[in-house]
Amino acid sequence: MSLPDTFRRPDVRADGLCAAPAHRWCLMGHVVAILLLLGISSLAAEAARPVSEAADWAISHVQIEPPAFNPTAGQSIKIHYHLSASADVTLTIYGPNRELLRELIADVPRAAGHNAEEWGGRDVAGVTVPDEAYFFIITTQAGKRKTVYDPRRHCGGECVIPKDCKWVPENQVVNYVLPKASRVILRSGGRLSGGPLLRTLVNWEPRPRGACSEPWDGLDSDGVRKMAPNDNGGISIAAFALPGNSIITTGNCKLTYRDYYLNKGRFRFHTPTVPRAERPRHGLTSPYSVIPVHLHKDIAISLNVVPLVGDGAVTGSSHGASSQPAGTQPSSGKSASKLPAVSLSGDRALLRIDIPDRTERMFMTNQRFDLVVYVDNRLIIEAEYGHVPIDWEWDLGGLEPGKHVLTVNLAGFRGNLGTASRLVEIVQGPK
């Protein structure tokens, strides 16, 4: 009697499914045993490794002390941090435009626990850095594991609302409170007060967290107009946050950051930008936070006012005239309260607005700007331009005889401002 095929083929079950023969089960048992042995050996090896290799390395408790310091007075700052395991540490200092200033330490062994590094406010060439906000990056390396502390991945750039902003005329200061270290722009005047911008007191400069005070005598940039003691509506303020643990330096009166950055050829290497996917998501980000810091600057403009009388007078073409009107003084950009009032008669006057400095002229015309003219806080014209000089014909109709304040703003699309004011006197009513 012959056996059924299912009994002749031990690898096929009666239900038609494959069945492993005995020697295959033995082989699988050996494989499982080997894998278990390997797993046990791996765990034993991991347990036998030093803590510096087995631990999940982390940099934590990073803080600076103090939050701001004066390098020109011999002060320094300490950068504190905690390592979960020993590692080689690199700490680099960067400028506000992401330029590498100095490698404070490079691949220096540091033990697990608390560590601190000290910086005296000098760059790689030994130059004392100008007043600004600087940030640092900490990198640890242990074996094949690398950890990076980059504060830009956690915060920075978000809009900040200053609190309790108030001008104290008896002390000639403007007081305000910042909820976190920020870049601040503070100007007198502005659209919120129903008039022109008159003077920049702080131009996106870094300020520490807490109470801040800025000196101001209440005058505009030309000393023509003084703000009333109770006119808090004449203050415009905005801010955006600095990266965490930003280092603010003070006291350097000999060197501005703009000159430092533009005149030093050694700034060729910049830290890479933070990838978009790794940037912090913290609400509204200020558009001014992405503008290079040295481009946050105001410009000096000249303002000339001359009457237009007769058919042979300059017509005031918006494309600019080839000759300079005479008889008035240009804006100095400083207190010019001794300038006499410009006397005007007739029904028209010519305003010539220019940017005397060639570099500033190119800077503004490359980005375009708005020309905004006010008379006694009343808006007269707002138009977009991309060139200077600008000759604009001013219709004097409706102005009563007497003295009036004329203010011109050139407002760049990057937030740059040029402002000038003149006291004009209408000698007789318009014809």
Image (cartoon, grey):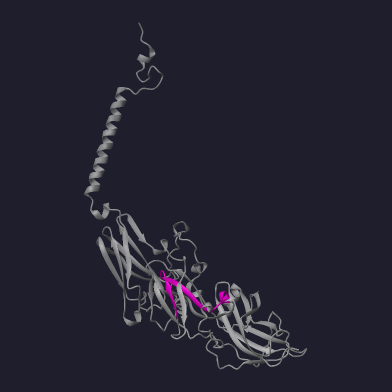
In the image, residue 339 above or below residue 289: below
Which residue occupies the foreground of this view, 161 or 417? 161
Which residue occupies the foreground of this view, 313 or 285? 285
Q: Is 48 covered by the magenta stretch?
A: no
Which residue occupies the foreground of this view, 203 or 178? 178
Q: Position of residue 53 (x, y in %)?
A: 27, 53
- Left or right position of 212 against 397: left
Q: Is 185 covered by the magenta stretch?
A: yes
Q: Position of residue 1 (x, y in %)?
A: 35, 5
Q: Position of residue 249 (x, y in %)?
A: 38, 76
Q: Quadrant of the C terminus?
A: bottom right
Residue range (magenta): 174-193
- Residue 210 visible? The answer is yes
> Which secondary structure type mostly characterizes the magenta part of the structure?
strand
- Residue 258 visible? The answer is no
Q: What's the residue at 61%, 81% (across, down)?
A: 377
